Image (tube, helix red, strand yellow):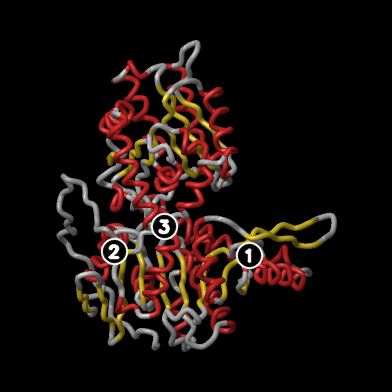
Amino acid sequence: MPDNQELTIVSNRLPIVMNFDEQNRQWNGKPGSGGLVSAMNPILQSRGGTWVGWPGMVAEKAEGYEQSLREVIEDIGQEAGYKLEPVMLSSEEVEGYYGGFANSVLWPLFHGFPNRCDFKPEFWEQYVEVNEKFAAGLANTMEPGQPIWVHDYHLIGVAEKLRQFGSPGNIGYFLHIPFPALENYVKLPWRADLMRALLAYDLLGFQSGRDKRNFLECVERLMPQTNIVHGDTTTTVEVQGEKVIVGVFPISIDFDDFNERAQSREVESRMERMREELGPYKMLLGIDRLDYTKGLLERFYAFEELLSRHPDLCEEVVFFQLVVPSRESVPEYQALKREIDRIVGRINGRFSTSKWQPIHYLYNTVDIAELTALYRHASVGVVTPLCDGMNLVSKEFCASQVDESGVLILSEFAGAADEFHEDALLVNPYDTVSTAEAIYEAVMMDEKERRKRMRRLRHEVQTHNVYWWANQFVDSLHEPSTLVEASKGEYLPTFEAPHRTNGHGIAPISPSERSPR
């Protein structure tokens, strides 16, 4: 993409944090943080452009303060160096589109938990309406032909709506979560609508080779009118004379940010405090948001198995698990939290001694310095989701391991396995015995082997950082046909059985008119 061509970023949330000052009756705001913001800021600042998203409060709360709210958002955008364009949503829309279809249908379905989906038709209707609202906002504000980069599962339908509004420009889409296998995707009542929406983009980006493979299999089985052309580094899906380029773009982190902070005096001071509080033990570390996809229960069962099979590790290791609160009002998440509390209490009650407690469990948030200190202090990082698009915790752990002494244990079902399978210890998180043995191997690994593995992991994250990821996608968006995939190739477990579809076949999606470009 030419350096002087502006770009539009579209995501569910704007990169801002807003709060209402009750005393002065006005809105205040500040720039947001996080990996996506870190990646997009330098690109938008250098090229110019617009970030479109929901500012985080329901429209009802902004009534009477619309002008001041917009002024605050404009001021933050001017300071950042690009425009911020808010899309206001009502409480009903947030409930149906975000809490409903996005997080109660797409999130569980795409992570392989279709039994947890709530397939309410009204959720789908709100999802379509909100995606159209985002598209309408884009059509009214962007320059003709300006490239657009849409992010994540909340906004799959934006391109299709833009096509209906007559937008001819290049529109790219990146899915931050996994794409489901065929046998799960077909359970979606609106599978045809969602597939057509995805094929309205010019460029589709996935986290891993597994996700790309799943998507193409769904296209092949559900849309026989398409033509799929596999190249050396790209795959093209031809739909009624239009071409969609499909690629793999593994997202990453700001390596230098974690690496430099890990060597700061503040982090070293916090590490000293951790040693005093936790004792002179090797620390196993888990960092996760509260979610059923993260494999938290299975991880605790594996740790219990470790102590049962290897009692020599009692009073030698501690397991520190940080769980960041999430969706605390949802009964399913409340139940998961109660089960975690119960299991941690049982394991500590079973194995604790007068001077040692095996699990240190914190249900809270921590600041970035504390998080980095945890990463650096850990002897073993335990990252074992049941399914994950990428899992940036694994990369943050490696970037913070400036002493090169830690070992990464990683789920085969995390997207990071594609990049890390040679140097991390890969596990099947459902297999608690094998996971326990992998943890034992990590704890007992000699220093030379630890350093060799961690040095290579850190080099991978440093070389393929978040800026590399963002620039790969933006450059490919300008001319999708020139895409060179960023992935090292798909990792498959050694003994994985070949994928087979069910013998009854799947009814194909009926051909339909594609939105004109």
Q: Is residue 329 above or below residue 432?
A: below
Residue 59 position within the rendered picture, expressed as x and y whole percent measured from the top left: 68, 67
Which one is earlier in the sequence, the residue at label 3 or at label 1?
A: 1
Q: Is residue 195 above or below residue 495?
A: below
* Tag count: 3
Q: Which residue is mark 2?
A: 212
* Mark 1 crowd level (few <14, some 14–19, many ≥20, 10 Å Cα): many
> What element does badge 3 sit on?
loop
Horizontal relation, residue 40 to residue 228: left or right: right
Which label sits in the foreground, 3 or 1? 3
**Residue 465 disc label:** 3
Residue 491 position within the rendered picture, expressed as x and y whole percent measured from the top left: 24, 52
From this viewpoint, which residue is outermost toward the top? 354
Residue 435 position within the rendered picture, expressed as x and y whole percent measured from the top left: 29, 33
> What element does badge 2 sit on?
helix
Please name the residue shown 66% across and 63% down the image: 58
Which label sits in the foreground, 2 or 3? 3
